[in-house]
Amino acid sequence: MQQEQEALDLAADWADISQGLRKDLGHQLHSQWIKPIQLGSFCKETGTLDLFLPTEFSANWVADRFADRLSLAWKIARPDIRNVRIAVLPGRRAMPGLRLGREDGRRAANDGVQLAQPGDALGMGNADFGGIGGGGIGGPVGLDPSLTFASFVTGAANVLASNAAQRMAATETPQFAPLYLKAATGQGKTHLLHSIGHAYLANHPRARIFYCSAERFMVEFVQALRQNQTIEFKARLRGFDLLLVDDIQFIIGKASAQEELLYTIDALLAEGKRLVFAADRAPQALDGVEQRLLSRLSMGLVADIQPADIELRRAILEHRLQRFAPSHVPGDVVEFLARTINRNVRELVGGLNKLIAYAQLTGQAVSLQLAEEQLTDILSANRRRITIDEIQRTVCQFYRVDRTEMASKRRARAVVRPRQVAMYLAKVLTPRSYPEIGRKFGGRDHSTVIHAVRLIEDLRTRDADMDGDVRSLLRQLES
């Protein structure tokens, strides 16, 4: 009877949480990812609640995007829930050969949320307030084992932050403290936080590390206040050798939490311990932060991570492909993703994950057409609105042909090749279908456009001059 009542209470809380997420996320996202979630069991000893999804892919996706929201919502609704574990529904078997690595920047570990397969024994209690100690079986609790310096791809956009992070984790005492990583969403700051934790623990096996999001810091602090355990809270927090706090912008406006964080920073710095913070804006741009705390955050090194350029995006995709089961991803697909998904690294890697997962689950080959069909939402969000008229104008200027030749019936090679290049670029850079593109080129049939796209794709692999022309045109159109 008691178990039945507990199940009913959980179901009622989930109904309220789900309704709130529906308002926040919108009907489409909620229906696709939140609605399929099924409640599992709740372990009172560990404070762990299981949430199940029907497939490994959906479990990964929900853990990547909504772990923080789910954890915070449950902690607010039920103080006895300390950890939320996202898993595949028991009885569902993972597809053979589908081995998706965790996405860079995953937040599943951030807020006491874990992604697990049914039957995993995680033992994730909260007795040590997220503390990480050396020598633990199965790796440090709270740190994603896939997010290490070895898996972090560096380039001009992030080399300063990467080098500073490695210095912070080294055996020698760093010359700056604290380290503040500033980057927009999905550019790799969380990856670097996890990497610092792993490397520091490797260099200092008996060290105690604390990793959390600012939201979790506030939740734990408020719980300590309610339970009259603030002294224990402070003692535990200041007993760590390395403090890693993500998304520090979310501590804005919380006066009591700000004050406690300020005192903690002072205490740890006075003892020569290491602190790393990450946020989506510079310290000076944090509204509502007390001046004393702001000065502490900016007194060390503020390392900016710029949006990844095209070379870095290519390198990230090539590096990522090494982590999958053997599968063929054509070079033109890699180039297409690198050029088109340019807002942040998380979307870039997520797009690749989704494309390969879909291809393996359906038995289809990875192709440019499949990428365009399955990544519509991601591509449309990233694309600058380049028009076919703009493409035709740029191609005509590049090849020095008259604009009217784009729609003419002339078959001279000096006219046909630029026209085919323009059709190819129209397919690569716009969401227009083959028939729509054909209509913009003098009412040509869609088969003519398909032939042009395939021809230019083939020529780019065999003809260095053609590949150079297309690359030059892409730079002009995307700049």
Image (spheres, rainbow, N blue to C red):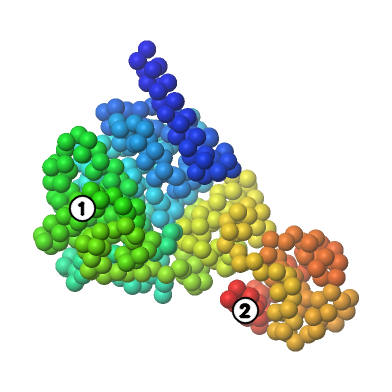
Q: Quadrant of the N terminus?
A: top left
Q: Residue furthest right?
A: 409
**Residue 74 figure quarter:** top left
Q: For mark 1, give the secondary structure.
A: helix
Q: Quadrant of the C terminus?
A: bottom right
Residue at the (22%, 68%) spot, across then down: 299
Q: Looking at the image, can residue 419 be seen?
A: yes
Name the kind of residue labelled 2 in the image: Gln
Q: Earlier in the sequence, mark 2 or mark 1?
A: 1
Residue at the (45%, 34%) spot, across then down: 17
The mark closer to the camera, 2 or 1, is 1
Disc 2 from disc 1: Cα separation: 51 Å
The residue under label 2 is: 476
- The residue lying toward the viewer, choosing from 128 and 94, is 128
**Residue 289 figure quarter:** bottom left
Q: Is residue 201 left or right of residue 250?
A: left
Residue at the (37%, 40%) spot, across then down: 71
Q: Residue 95, percent across and down?
A: 53, 41
The residue under label 1 is: 259
Is 424 above or below relative to 393? Answer: above
